[in-house]
Amino acid sequence: MATIAWIEDDVNIIETLLFPLERKGHSIKKFGSVGEAIGAIDQLRHADVIVVDMLLPPGTFTGPCGPYPGVDLLKHLTQSEKIQVPILVLSVVKSEQVLDQVRCLGILDILRKPVLPSTLELRIEAIVGRTGAGSATA
């Protein structure tokens, strides 16, 4: 099964959406802020999928931080760190302008909250299947 790096500050959402994934055997690494995620960059590099919320607290992140810290994190991951791990954005942000910024970073997997656990599970499994990620641990 896959290793999922989950960057989300809302504990209720994490617990609701993680249970079905963990039950299927996926390993979840949780991070609650931009700074915490950047501090664990090696863990992110070795994940099979990274799930990112757009409305994150910056935490210890000292880089430029706009109104959507998740976008700043995505820029850091894709441009500065050049992470090759597939990224799924999961957020309440409805602004097409903001979502276009995400798409311009090459991130096309975007789900809007609220999302059903089964929908999230299917999307993650599709990403894992598309990339061949997680096959070494299956």
Image (cartoon, rainbow, N blue to C red):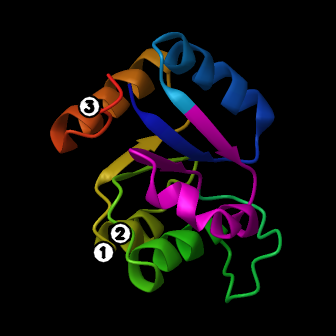
Residue holding disc 3: 135
Q: Residue furthest right?
A: 60
For the point 67% across and 42% down, the residue is 30
The mark that comes first in sequence, 1 or 3, is: 1
At label 2, the amino acid type is: Asp
Q: Secondary structure at mark 1?
A: helix
Asked whether the viewer can see residue 69, the reply is yes
What amino acid does circle 3 point to? Ser
At which x and y percent is residue 103? 31, 66
Please report the bounds of the magenta region as a residue range. Answer: 28-53
Question: In the rendered image of this protein, does residue 78 appear above or below residue 23?
Answer: below
Query: Quick check: 56 left or right of 128?
Result: right
The answer to whether the residue labelled 2 contacts the one labelled 1, judged by CB atoms less than 8 Å apart, is yes
**Residue at position x 46%, y 85% from top?**
80
Point out residue 28 in the picture as x, y percentages from the top left corner: 58, 34
**Is 134 located above or below residue 56 in the figure?**
above
The quadrant where residue 43 appears:
bottom right
Q: Is residue 93 left or right of residue 130?
A: right
Residue 2, how many percent across, how many down? 40, 32
Residue named by callout 2: 100
Q: Is residue 20 above or below residue 91?
A: above
Q: Is residue 26 left or right of residue 123?
A: right
Secondary structure state at the residue bearing disc 2: helix
Q: Is residue 78 magenta?
A: no
Residue that label 1 marks? 104
Residue type at tag 1 = Cys
Among the two numbered marks 3 and 2 on one chain, the one whose residue lies closer to the N terminus? 2
Q: Quadrant of the N terminus?
A: top left
